[in-house]
Every structure is written in structure tokens, then in C-alpha cells.
Amino acid sequence: MARHSKLQKQVLSLYRQFLRAAQDKPGFIPRIRDEFHANAAIKKTDVMHIEYLYRRGQRQLELLKDVNTKQLGSFSKSKEDSS
Amino acid sequence: MSRTSHHKRLRVHRQPESSNMAAVCAASRVLGRKIVSSKALPAVCQTSNRKLHFSIYGKRGDAKVSDAISTQYPVVDHEFDAVVVGAGGAGLRAAFGLSEAGFNTACVTKLFPTRSHTVAAQGGINAALGNMEEDNWRWHFYDTVKGSDWLGDQDAIHYMTEQAPAAVVELENFGMPFSRTEEGKIYQRAFGGQSLKFGKGGQAHRCCCVADRTGHSLLHTLYGRSLRYDTSYFVEYFALDLLMEDGECKGVIALCMEDGSIHRFRAKNTVIATGGYGRTFFSCTSAHTSTGDGNAMVTRAGLPCQDLEFVQFHPTGIYGAGCLITEGCRGEGGILINSEGERFMERYAPNAKDLASRDVVSRSMTIEIREGRGVGPDKDHVYLQLHHLPPQQLAARLPGISETAMIFAGVDVTKDPIPVLPTVHYNMGGVPTNYKGQVITHKDGEDTVVPGLYACGEAGCASVHGANRLGANSLLDLVVFGRACALTIAETNTPGEKLSPLKPNAGEASVANLDKIRFANGSTRTSEIRLNMQKTMQSHAAVFRTGDVLKEGCDKMESVYKSLEDIKTFDRGIVWNTDLVETLELQNLMLNAVQTIVSAEARTESRGAHAREDFKDRVDEYDYSKPLQGQVKKPFEQHWRKHTLSYVDPKTGKVTLEYRPVIDNSLNAEDCAAIPPAIRSY
């Protein structure tokens, strides 16, 4: 398998940092996983987009690490109701 | 759960047997620790037939549940000791005042702090420092009470004017680069409505300034100072609503514009410092972001707003562009002239002339234009002349407006006069507070404090400005009451206090509203509705107001409010959805506008900035133009020296009005005697 590029390594390291930071706070891990898995579909060549998401992710990581952030919930609207 | 409600609302998902809970338990087994804290999903079920449900574990769980989900809004919960909404002059002062006192503070702002509208303030900040001539804060107190047309609460005015010198010295110590006199003391210029010896000693020079860019320096100084403290800034987070429970404010819910996530900031103390709502009018000196978000949040929480009918028209806004030309020009010697080249203010205010109070000057200008002595091809504005002043003085003391006049009016101030017109500038009304900054409501004839909620700055109404604000008192108001909120919170709370429990679905109505707007598919655009509202307000609630014109305006505003239901937005995304944010701002503006016009229509007198053509006199409990001997005091319902408290039902836009008495005693009668009402003339 080809070695990971520098950007790929950065993204993976960010993912690891996210998972570590989210351990004590309920609700973050599934969302982190979903977000990263959804964005994994972005083409490797689309560097601008990846870097933008990476920078945004770093800001969100800072927020997550902050001691005042407590949990992640969600308000969801089910399909049948939104007709 | 039965589904009897036919419109979209949020549902709280709490049954332990649900698939979500099963998923949570499964996940917690996997991760080896308890994921769900007890406060997140309480055991007691509350049946509600609403359409969004709140859960900790998002989409995880049963496939059936995850397929059924069409839209999901992740909600991050934060816990702080205090939250400040707004990062202008008042917000920053409150935020770092709280951080200084040791509180864990969050500052939620939709703009970067140095872009708040405080940066545009030009004139200065009043304080009785006595650098230009002998001065006394009690004279400043008198001027402010008179300026407010005796609608200001004298205890709050006493507090502000007494604290003024200390506040200015504190700012100077923070590094604010005030203009200096030859001796190196802070330069104070003359400003409208300021006098010596309780009005008998001539013009006072009390306005400390930084050339004509005081607001800019103030905001940058405060921002620089705030970086020393560990306040957490949440920049570009649009505050949607207050989290109210049992009449107590438990925090704020906000939308992060950058990634579209919702954030709930739980705190025991919330400070509203969101500024005014100039953008309800077509022509105003305010930024596009002055949308009265704080007033609207308070209204939606079922609390009243105070004195919203008092909108200040600044005499000198550039004709056409609406940009502000500071009163400091007139303080430095500029004069207003009509088409005949006459200094017309001498007729309307023989003593103060151009430095009379702003409402007096605005009315004078409007009368001149109406009587046909306006300038320009349409004779619809007047001139502000500065070219008779020495150019060095203009360059030293008024550089900012020289540039503004060149850019927006194409005028060289050393040669030609500037075309000006009264323009909406400031909102005296806002969230009612006491002199300590605590938000109050009026129940059973008594002022009661709303626990956990504070307001300061233009968003608050303490009320120091009453029916009309004197120039340079607003920047003072910001720093004094920003600090007052921080001090009050520090007095009554300790850092690190445990938060009271909050319902897990708190804020669902705000998110439901957000969702509704995001997918709105009616027929009118946001910009069209906004323009309708602005034009209606501009033509029906202007400098001079008449009963039938106001009534027509109220009806038109009602239909504009209803047209909100038919709104159409175009951007369906959630990241940087400015269409959504502008629509939320429009909703906020609309709540402010209806309260303004309905309160104006109800007030049948002329007081301060509210001038009625059909009711030209001030209606107080006594007729102060005659001696008081032998006069019968009018009962509360029959006079107008009282504060208006307005409530709105957000669903229908219907405004209900109540009234509350003015506080006529100062904080300390020996130190500073209260000023009894009198006829107001300049």
C-alpha cells in the first residue's frame, strides 16, 4: 500500500486527538466518527477542501478540549414528520 | 405517543425502553464506562407530541431510527459561571470585569469584538473631570436628568455620573489615547446639552475624546485589555434565544455560523449587551448588524422591553448615505445653516444654540425643512458649516469626519458645508434594568428582579437616557454599566457554583424555528420583507409623529409581520448560511419594530425624542409650567411620566403595553439631591 501523504497523516493524527479528547464527554464519539467517515469520500487531490476541513477541525478540537464543553446531543427531526 | 399536534414541534425522547437508550447501553458496554450522565436523560417521561427529539447519542442505534431521521442538529453543551452576549463596549467591559473577579466567563458574539458597532462612535465620553474649567458631577447629573426629559431613573443617573470620572481614568489607565490639552491632561470638548452650575453657568466642556474616533479607540483599548484575562470568546456565534426555566435565566442557545452546530451555554448569570436596533429604519447611522437581537430574545422569553418608542434622530447624518457626523463638530464650533445662510438654531434654542439637546436640534431642522428653508435641489436637508474654523483645528480634532464627508458627500470641509439630515441613531429603550444592571419586570406594582439575567449598554435601559440621550453619554453608559453588571454578579455569586438542572430539551423551540426558516419556501424574500418594514417605520415613525399616521403604520407593520410566515429562503445548507442568519435577524428586527410603533401610537404626549404633532405638550402628573401651589396631582393612568413596558406574542405579533413609574429619588439624597421636574428649554 502506498505510504500516507503528509496531509493524510495530519488528518489521521487529528482523528486520534479527537477520539482521545472526546473520551470523557458523552455523545461526541459517534459524531466524530460519522464526520470523518463522510469526509473520507473526498478525493485525495482536492487539497483545498481537505485543508479547509482540517483547519475547521482544529478549531473544533480546541473547543472540545476546553474544560467547559460538556456533552454533545442532537435535536433530530424524523422523516415522517417533515412531510 | 399520540400525534395530535399538526405543526412541527420538537419531541423529547426519554423512554428507557427506546432504541436509543438500548444503543447507549450497548455503546457504554463497549467503551467500558457510563456514557450517559444522569442529568442528560432523566427518568421521568414528559409526553409531548412534538416533532424534533433530543438525544445524546445522535444517529447511533437502531437502523429503523436512523433511517427515519431527516435532519439532525448537533448540540454542544457548555457550562460556565457567566455568559455575556455581545462583545461591543459594554459586553467586553462586562466580560473582562467578570474574568477579573474570577468567574469562568464566555463571551458569545456574532461579530469579531472590534467590529461591533461601538467602533463607529465618534464623539466622546462625558465625565466631570474638570480639566477645562471647574466641574462637578452633580451638574452632569442635572444635565442628564434634564436631557432625559425627566423620564430617566435618577438613581441610575446618579450612579453613572458619579462613576464617570473614575471610569474615564480607568480607561486612560488601560491605555486609551485621549486627546490632550497643552498641560497633558485629557482634552474635554463642549457637547450638546452639557452645562455648568445646574444649567446656569453656560456651556460645559465635559466630553473626553480621542479626536473624533473615540468609539474606535475605546473598543480597541477594551479588546486589548480583555486579552489579559481568560475569557472564552465564541466569535461568530449567533445567539438565538435565552434558556429560561421557571422565570429564571439559565443560559443562552446559539448557532455557530462557521459549522452550523448549535451550542447551549449554561450559566447562572447571563448578560445581554447586544446593542440597538437601528436597522428597523430605512435611513440610520447604524451598522447592518444592529438588529436588536437582545431585545428580541428577551421578548420571546415573555419579558417586557422598556421605552422602545424613544428613538433618537441624530441631527447630523450625511444626507443620502446616512453616515454619522459627530456632534463634536458643533462642539468645536460648527453651525447648522438653512437655505438663507441663517444660523437657525439661535431661534429655537437661544442659549445653547447648536449645542442644544439632540431631539431639539432634530426637530428644529425638520421644521426648517418643512417651512421651505431646506437646501439642495429638493430642499430636503440643511447644511453643517465647518469652513469657518481654522484648518489646523479641523485636522487635529475632527480628522475622521473630514474623511467621511469627503468619501460619502464629496465635500471638502475646509471649503464647503456638509449636507445633513436627522437620521436614526440610537435607541433609548431596551431591556429594563435597575441601576445595578439586573433585568426587572413589573408585577403587582413592584419591580421584581429576573434571576440570572442582566443587561447593559444600548440593549439595556437602566434608564439613564430616559426620553432622550445626551451626546457622549452612551459610551459612558457602556463602561459604567458593563462594570456594574460584573460587580453585581461578583457580589451575589461565587465562581464555580454548581448549576441548577436544566431540561435536556431546553432550546428546542429555537432550533425548531431555525429549521423552519432554513427550509422556508414561501413567496417573499427576506430582503423584500425587510425593506417593507424599514420603509414603513421610516415614513410612519419619523421625527414628528401624528396619531393617524402612526395608526396606519401600526396596521401596516401588522401585515408586514404576518408576511413573515410567507418567507422564502434560498440557502438550505447550515454552514455559513447568511440567508438564515439574516432571516433570524429580520425576525428580531420585526419584534423591535412592532413594539416601537405601537408604543409610539399609544403615548399621547411629546417627550424627549418622541414628538407628537397632535399632542405637542408633555403630560406630567403636575403642570410644571405653572406654579405647583393648588394643583391636583394626576393619577398614574392619566399622565405620561412613566416607562412603557411592551410585551409581544411572537406568533401573532400582537403588542400589549403596561406602564411602570419613573424612579425619582437619587441613590443618596444628601450627596446629590434629586431634580424635580421642570420645563425643558435650552
Image (cartoon, rainbow, N blue to C red):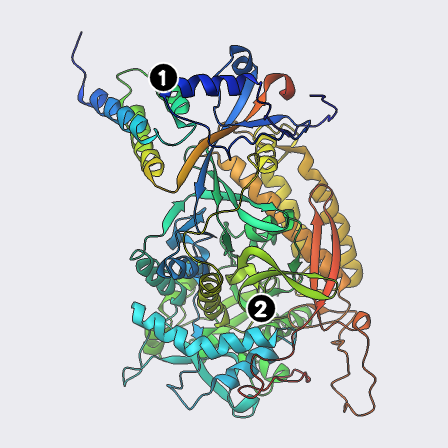
Label 2 crowd bin: few (<14), some (14–19), many (20+), radius 10 Å: many
Task: Give the number of callouts.
Answer: 2
- Dot 2 lies on which element? loop
Q: Secondary structure at mark 1?
A: helix
Q: Amino acid at mark 2?
A: Val
Q: Residue B319 in the image: x percent, y percent? A: 53, 61
Location of mark 2 (residue): B375
> Which residue in the protein does label 1 denote?
A37
Q: Chain of mark 2?
A: B
Label 1 lies in what chain? A
Residue B381 visible, this orientation: no
Q: Residue furthest top?
A: A1
Question: Three-letter amino acid code at disc 1?
Answer: His
The answer to whether any part of residue B137 appears in the image is yes
Foreground of the two, B134 or A57? A57
Report whether mark 1 lies on the same chain as mark 2.
no
Occupied quadrant, residue B619: bottom right
Q: Nearer the viewer, mark 1 or mark 2?
A: 1
